[in-house]
Image (spheres, rainbow, N blue to C red):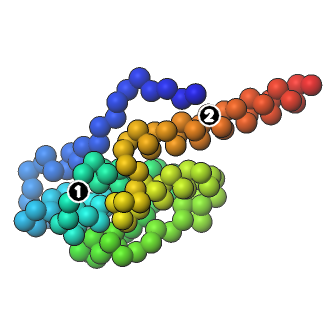
Amino acid sequence: MVKSIFKIKLIDFGISKKLNINTNYIICKSVFGTPKYLAPEIIKKKKFSYQSDIYAIGILLYEVLVGVAPFEDNDKYGLLKMHIKEKMIKPRLINNLVSKPIENIIKKAMAKNIKNRYKSIDELQKDFNLYFENKYNFFKLKNENSKK
């Protein structure tokens, strides 16, 4: 079983910088943040919550496992539209080492509709724990069987 002794907090350090005209951040009335990680509900100026951070975690997971962001556009506003309208390319199509269960975790974390996204970080963590427990048990069982 995977246990964590640390709590992870996702913070957009970019918004703490002094902003200038060449910034990679969006500031439009109530929308403020890094376009690469903004959840659709934030872009649409709808009600958002910690589930918006879960969307950003999904983006980070995608980037780490695939090597590129799920949505890329040199135009900030084009990138924002992609978050709202475009489907991500399945991670396994880019990196075949990404397992189907991990792809499903990313897909759920990045659901366009907040109602389809993880309800809490605990729910996301539960899926990760199940994945790693099953993976660990599979390898443990496989190694024990090979010794016989």
Residue 10 marker: none
User: Viewed as shown, does residue 29 lie left or right of 34?
Assistant: left
Residue matched to label 2: 133
Q: Nearer the viewer, residue 39 or 24?
A: 39
The quadrant in which residue 142 appears is top right
The x and y percentages for residue 134 are 65, 37
Distance from the alpha carbon under mark 2 to that under mark 1:
32 Å
Q: Residue at x 66, y 38 (%)?
A: 135
The x and y percentages for residue 28 are 10, 67
Element marked by disc 1: loop
Precedes in sequence: disc 2 or disc 1: 1
Visible in this render: residue 67?
A: no
Give the crowd class for mark 2: few <14, some 14-19, many >=20 residues within 10 Å: few
Q: Residue at x 8, y 51 (%)?
A: 18
Indicate the quadrant containing the C terminus: top left, top right, bottom left or bottom right: top right
The quadrant in which residue 121 appears is top left
Q: Amino acid at mark 1?
A: Phe
Residue 109 drawn above or below residue 140: below
User: Viewed as shown, does residue 128 lie left or right of 7?
Assistant: right
Indicate the quadrant containing the N terminus: top left, top right, bottom left or bottom right: top right
Element marked by disc 2: helix
Q: Amino acid at mark 2?
A: Glu
Visible in this render: residue 141?
A: yes
Q: Nearer the viewer, residue 110 or 69?
A: 110
Q: Residue at x 23, y 74 (%)?
A: 77
Residue matched to label 1: 48
